[in-house]
């Protein structure tokens, strides 16, 4: 399994990715850097977020955290996962006919090899620290406060 500095931040990344994908229609992050204090996700998008979008994304992620959604692992045949999920960022180490899929309530499903919190209730308060846009890439920096 991939090592992460903080399983809470990795779980928050999943919530952010699904929320951004739904809100902006740009898909999941194509790149991310997850750390204990502050993390970032990069998306292919045509501009920076408006203050309203930023606030809406932050509020939605915090609603999901407060909902205490269960985070569970399931094994899925690769062929089924290829039809149902975006596997673009699946690491090479995820070879084989069966993939590990992380489900956060009924909100998100993502093939992933990393560790996660057991529930969104463990995450704390999600905060977007900053956003920026350059050369077709929207970067969202975020943190979790206790």
Image (cartoon, rainbow, N blue to C red):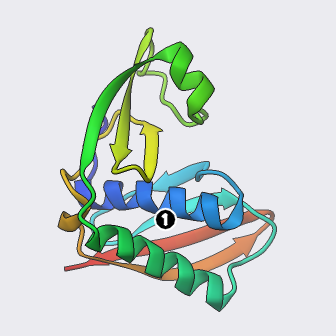
Quarter of the figure that contains the N terminus? top left
Identify the residue at image location x=43%, y=60%: 15
Tag 1 residue: 40
User: 135 left or right of 14?
Assistant: right
Query: Residue 125 sits in which quadrant?
Result: bottom left
Query: Is 113 situated above or below 43?
Result: above
Identify the residue at image location x=62%, y=24%: 83
- Give percent across and percent down for residue 78: 50, 16
In what element is the residue under mark 1? strand
- Give percent across and percent down for residue 92: 48, 22
Query: Is 131 situated above or below 23?
Result: below
Identify the residue at image location x=48%, y=29%: 91
Q: Nearer the viewer, residue 65 or 31?
A: 65
- Give percent across and percent down for residue 140: 55, 71
Mark 1 crowdedness (10 Å alpha carbons): few <14, some 14-19, many ≥20 = many
Query: Is 137 situated above or below 48?
Result: above
Q: Is residue 6 visible?
A: no
Identify the residue at image location x=36%, y=43%: 103
Query: Residue 64 sits in which quadrant?
Result: bottom left
């Amino acid at each position: 399994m991939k090592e992460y500095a903080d399983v809470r931040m990795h779980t928050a990344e999943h919530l952010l990715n699904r929320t951004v994908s739904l809100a902006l229609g740009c898909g999941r992050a194509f790149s991310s850097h997850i750390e204990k204090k502050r993390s970032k996700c990069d998306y292919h998008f045509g501009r920076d977020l408006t203050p309203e979008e930023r606030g809406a994304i932050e509020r939605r992620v915090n609603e999901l955290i407060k909902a205490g959604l269960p985070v569970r692992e399931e094994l899925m045949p690769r062929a089924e996962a290829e039809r149902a999920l975006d596997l673009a960022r699946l690491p090479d180490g995820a070879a084989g006919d069966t993939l590990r899929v992380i489900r956060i309530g009924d909100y998100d499903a993502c093939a992933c090899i990393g560790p996660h919190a057991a529930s969104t209730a463990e995450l704390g308060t999600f905060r977007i620290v900053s956003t920026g846009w350059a050369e077709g890439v929207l970067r969202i920096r975020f943190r979790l406060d206790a």
